[in-house]
């Protein structure tokens, strides 16, 4: 009895894939790749990809087989497995035993796949090759990731775009050696917000607010904390603002952060008021503050200079209105009519 067409196809696929991985035969690498391609066309896509990945691993022990591994990676990409293709290409980039040309070509292949999450995942291998070889690939990782994420988002790949950006935003307070600057992290957080992932954006801004590294300016930390509040994540915003109020160097920034918590947050109010009291007690007594408020109101009414106000403005306090606002939080009954 003759075999059914399906059985014949299965046997043909099996035969072709045996040719692919049997390194004892003398088939050229291109013939092996061609055999896998035919097997895929016969319906054995997954098996063909698996065979090609195995072939690339077998070639990896041969220092002369870099070009063959490149062709295997390209064929795997054609068959629809971008992830495996990038893994093969990345291994080529990081293989110090291969020639410069083959590694550079693999790096360029990865860069050409930069509009996919899998393509971007290979960027570290590209940078490794560039650093080891002293080659300028013309890319900055943060800019590359942000640009790739924007292209993915335009193509509707929102989840992939978010994952690409998270690599930037999760650097910093969770990393001993920061790869990305605060500007990079801020821009990535803004892009996350623009993509609609407000939770990831809030987490990113929160990290910038509580990160007290040497390059973290007080105003930048406050701005980041306020962005968390703007995104509506009140619990994180309260924690971020209280951290800024407690840790920052400039008293004006600390007051602004504490006032935001005391005025608008459900959590952290007690600690914020405590910080406000500590800051103001360094310079003013309760009576001085209330008298200064009255002096200010008089000077505003008659538009004449106020000595008390002028002295206060020069006493290391650049924002008198801010002090008064903080005072009203501390002593609300003193300012009720």
Image (cartoon, rainbow, N blue to C red):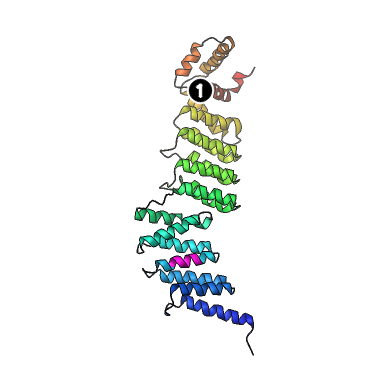
What is the chief secondary structure element of the magenta stretch? helix
> Which stretch appears magenta?
69-75
Q: Going 35% across and 55% down the picture, which residue do you hit?
A: 133
Q: Quadrant of residue 57?
A: bottom left
| Residue 316 placement (x, y as % from top left) | 44, 22
Residue 94 visible to the viewer? no
Q: Going 51% across and 34% down the picture, which residue do you hit?
A: 222
- Would you name the residue on which mark 1 appears? 319
Q: Nearer the viewer, residue 220 or 233?
A: 220
Q: Nearer the viewer, residue 309 or 43?
A: 43
**Residue 186 against residue 44 in the figure, above or below:** above
| Residue 241 placement (x, y as % from top left) | 53, 35
Q: Going 49% across and 70% down the picture, which residue do you hit?
A: 52
> Does residue 74 belong to the magenta stretch?
yes
> Does residue 259 belong to the magenta stretch?
no
**Residue 263 against residue 128 in the figure, above or below:** above
């Amino acid at each position: 009895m003759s075999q059914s067409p399906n059985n014949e196809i299965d046997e043909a696929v099996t035969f072709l894939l045996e040719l692919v991985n049997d390194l004892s035969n003398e088939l050229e690498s291109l013939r092996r790749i061609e055999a896998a391609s035919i097997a895929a066309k016969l319906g054995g896509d997954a098996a063909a990809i698996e065979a090609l990945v195995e072939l690339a691993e077998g070639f990896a022990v041969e220092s002369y087989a870099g070009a063959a591994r490149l062709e295997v990676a390209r064929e795997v990409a054609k068959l629809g497995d971008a992830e495996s293709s990038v893994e093969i290409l990345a291994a080529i980039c990081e293989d110090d035993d291969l020639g410069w040309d083959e590694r550079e070509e693999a790096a360029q292949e990865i860069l050409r796949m930069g509009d996919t999450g899998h393509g971007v995942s290979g960027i570290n291998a590209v940078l490794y090759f560039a650093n080891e070889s002293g080659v300028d690939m013309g890319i900055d990782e943060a800019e590359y990731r942000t640009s790739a994420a924007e292209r993915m988002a335009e193509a509707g790949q929102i989840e992939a775009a978010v994952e690409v950006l998270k690599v930037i935003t999760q650097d910093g307070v969770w990393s001993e050696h920061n790869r990305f600057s605060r500007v990079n992290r801020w821009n990535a957080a803004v892009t996350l917000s623009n993509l609609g992932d407000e939770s990831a954006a809030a987490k990113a801004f929160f990290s910038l607010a509580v990160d007290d590294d040497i390059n973290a300016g007080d105003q930048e930390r406050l701005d980041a904390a306020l962005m968390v509040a703007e995104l509506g994540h009140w619990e994180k915003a309260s924690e971020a603002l209280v951290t800024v109020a407690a840790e920052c160097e400039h008293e004006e920034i600390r007051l602004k952060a504490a006032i935001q918590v005391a005025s608008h947050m459900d959590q952290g109010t007690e600690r914020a008021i405590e910080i406000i009291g500590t800051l103001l007690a360094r310079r003013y007594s309760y009576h001085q503050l209330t008298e200064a408020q009255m002096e200010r109101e008089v000077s505003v009414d008659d538009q004449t200079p106020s000595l008390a106000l002028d002295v206060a403005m020069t006493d290391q306090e650049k924002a008198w209105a801010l002090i008064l606002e903080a005072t009203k939080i501390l002593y609300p009954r003193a300012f009720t009519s």
